[in-house]
Amino acid sequence: MGAMSNVLRISAARPADALAHFAARLSFEADVSDVHADLEAGVPGLVVVDSRSGAAWRQGHVPGAVHLPTEEIAVRAGELVPPDATVVTYCWGPGCNGATRAALEFARLGRPVKEMIGGYEYWVREGFPVRTEAGLIRRPADDLTAPAGASCGC
């Protein structure tokens, strides 16, 4: 008698349900590689918002991002983010739901919004540039998140 499968104990979703689920996830989330590529390409209509504190922003942030802490979004979004822009929020990383709370605030304002999964942590870990008070810096990519000298190609 074979071992009981932990993976198959609950059957996989029907393909139509899986299609709806995964398509929905991609409408809510963007990964750091895709955000980086779009920023590098100068894709119009995309605004990346760092929802962290001022101290965190000064420590380092995504170049080109707008600093807008979550508690200020309802009051200041109109002056900092064009009304027709798609917003991508980020916070510290996967262990923090600050970007989710920020995205919720933009959704409450009726703005199209996505969350950058992985946040600032994975931006840095993938070796993308970071703006600090001292200027632009780039740390080596962590080989657990990005192949050395290449993109993951996903």
Image (cartoon, rainbow, N blue to C red):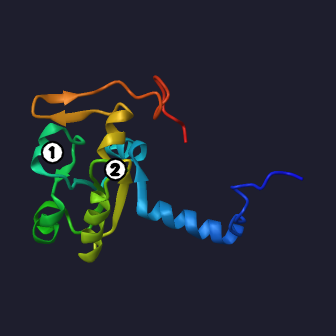
| Residue 48 visible, this orientation | yes
What amino acid is found at the position of numbered circle 2 in the picture?
Answer: Val
- In 3D space, how far apart are the residues under numbered discs 1 and 2 (Cα atoms)? 23 Å
Q: Residue at x 38, y 45 (%)?
A: 32
Would you place residue 152 above or below residue 31 in this image? Answer: above
| Residue 45 visible, this orientation | no
Secondary element under disc 1, as helix, strand or loop, is: helix
- 1 vs 2, front mark: 1
Q: Residue at x 46, y 27 (%)?
A: 143
Quarter of the figure with residue 131: top left
Residue 132 placement (x, y as % from top left): 15, 34
Which residue is labeled 2 in the image? 43
Which residue is labeled 1 in the image? 57
Would you place residue 95 above or below residue 71 in this image? Answer: above
Residue 81 placement (x, y as % from top left): 18, 62
Which of the two residues, 7 or 146, is positioned nearer the viewer here? 7
User: Which comes before the other along the chain, label 1 or label 2?
Assistant: 2
What amino acid is found at the position of numbered circle 1 in the picture?
Answer: Trp
Check disc 1: other Cα within 10 Å, few if <14, some if 14-19, many if 20+: many
- The quarter of the image holding the C terminus is top right
In screen coordinates, is 147 left or right of 14? left
Would you place residue 81 above or below residue 142 in this image? Answer: below
Which of the two residues, 83 or 151, is positioned nearer the viewer here? 151
